[in-house]
Amino acid sequence: MSCSVAVCNSPVFSPSPSLFCNKHSILSSSPSSASASLNSPFRLRLQKPPTCLSPASSTDQSPPGGVLKRKRPTRLDIPIVTTGDFVAPTSERTAATPREESREVEREGDGYSVYCKRGRREAMEDRFSAITNLQGDRRHAMFGVYDGHGGVEAAEFAAKNLDKNVLEAVAGGNKKRDESEIADAVKRGYMTTDAAFLNGENVKGGSCCVTAMFDDGNLVVSNVGDCRAVMSVGGVAEALSSDHRPSRDDERTRIETTGGYVDTFHGVWRIQGSLAVSRGIGDAHLKRWVIAEPETKMLRIEQDHEFLILASDGLWDKVSNQEAVDIARPFCLGTEEKPLLAACKKLVDLSASRGSSDDISVMLIPLDQFM
């Protein structure tokens, strides 16, 4: 189980159709320019989030009430890895995975396409994963996009282990579970992955994650950090995740009540003056405040649910949710004769042309297969 992309037949996940009863390091200083929409009529189908949640945008430069007045603590330095290898994706999990340096990685699998492009760093820190055809059923699958910071280690570890841990946690409960029980199982999978990484030998850096799990027409989306999931609902962009940034009111309050400090650095809100995301896998030196607990939303896939975009903030910093849906939609609905992978590349190239220097990863998942 050593590759960042996996397509395999696995007996691990077997929930029934009754599953539902009803960063970045200091070097990455670009805030997100696209906020997730929370006002769509479709929102009523999602699990209701806490009223304090609101995704951050590029305009979130200061919290309500003005500038924080606190004594600045000693700044923590995040180790930066300037060289490294990228795990080349393969079609199945293997014990030994060939490694290679790569600037671009692309894959077209069963029910998805993904394209990753390295930014200005010498090593690609983004990863992705895909497990399809669980128990021989094309409607059962799990996908993920992982955005590393401070090195590749955490993102690579999450890509190899997070999906497996989540699937095992979900399959290990009772057959009939409500949404809160499913969310708790997903949380256990994330927390297990985080603990295993922190107990390992190489625990440098951290990783943001967004995952999408499909089961018999149900969709479970979870995230930590600022990787984002956006769905096209009849051509309208609907965000299924909220970015975890220190500028979010609830995240800032959580950090400060546990003894942390939030301030701006070059216009970006950061924890302890260093990290621009407030949740993730890893980040051992900030673990008291950078938690691995995901937020999870669940829904039943319906006819007007067209496709899902999973992407790192390298896309969302420069391309809005609706723009991404508008560009991808002709490819996903078949009105554009080019393959789905071309839509991923078009989105990545658009962000790069607008000045993104970050790694950019975009995964497109048409939803008709999973209804």
Image (cartoon, rainbow, N blue to C red):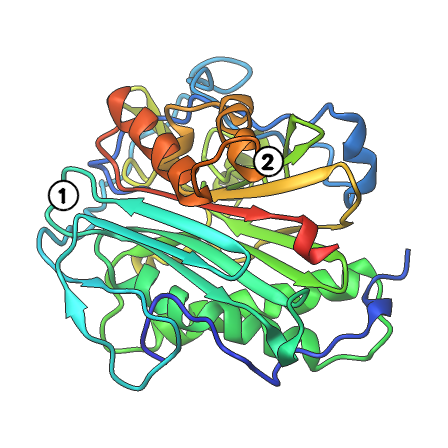
Query: Which element is circle 2 on?
Result: helix
The residue at the point 70 percent across, 82 percent down is 172
Residue with the mark numbered 1: 121
Q: Position of residue 154 (x, y in %)?
A: 32, 62
The residue at the point 39 percent across, 54 percent down is 146
Q: Mark 2 against mark 1, which lies toward the viewer?
A: 1
Q: Quadrant of the C terminus?
A: bottom right
Residue with the mark numbered 2: 250
Q: Are marks 2 and 1 in contact (CB under 8 Å)?
A: no
Q: Amino acid at mark 2?
A: Asp
Relative horizontal placement of residue 100, taking residue 4 as reference (left or right): left
First in residue order: circle 2 vs circle 1: 1
The residue at the point 65 percent across, 48 percent down is 367
**Which quadrant of the view contains residue 204?**
bottom left
Towards the viewer: 291 or 9: 9
**Which quadrant of the view contains residue 185?**
bottom right
Relative horizontal placement of residue 277, taking residue 202 as reference (left or right): right
**Which quadrant of the view contains residue 349?**
top left
**Gap between marks 2 and 1, in whole Å?**
32 Å
Q: Kindly identify which numbered label has been placed on residue 179.
A: none
Eyeballing the image, is 268 above or below 138?
Answer: above
Residue most toward the front? 337
Residue most toward the right? 22
Does residue 278 appear anywhere in the picture? no
Q: Position of residue 322 (x, y in %)?
A: 56, 23
Q: Amino acid at mark 1?
A: Arg
Q: Position of residue 65 (x, y in %)?
A: 54, 14
Eyeballing the image, is 181 above or below 25?
Answer: below
Towards the viewer: 43 or 263: 43
Q: Position of residue 284 (x, y in %)?
A: 33, 61
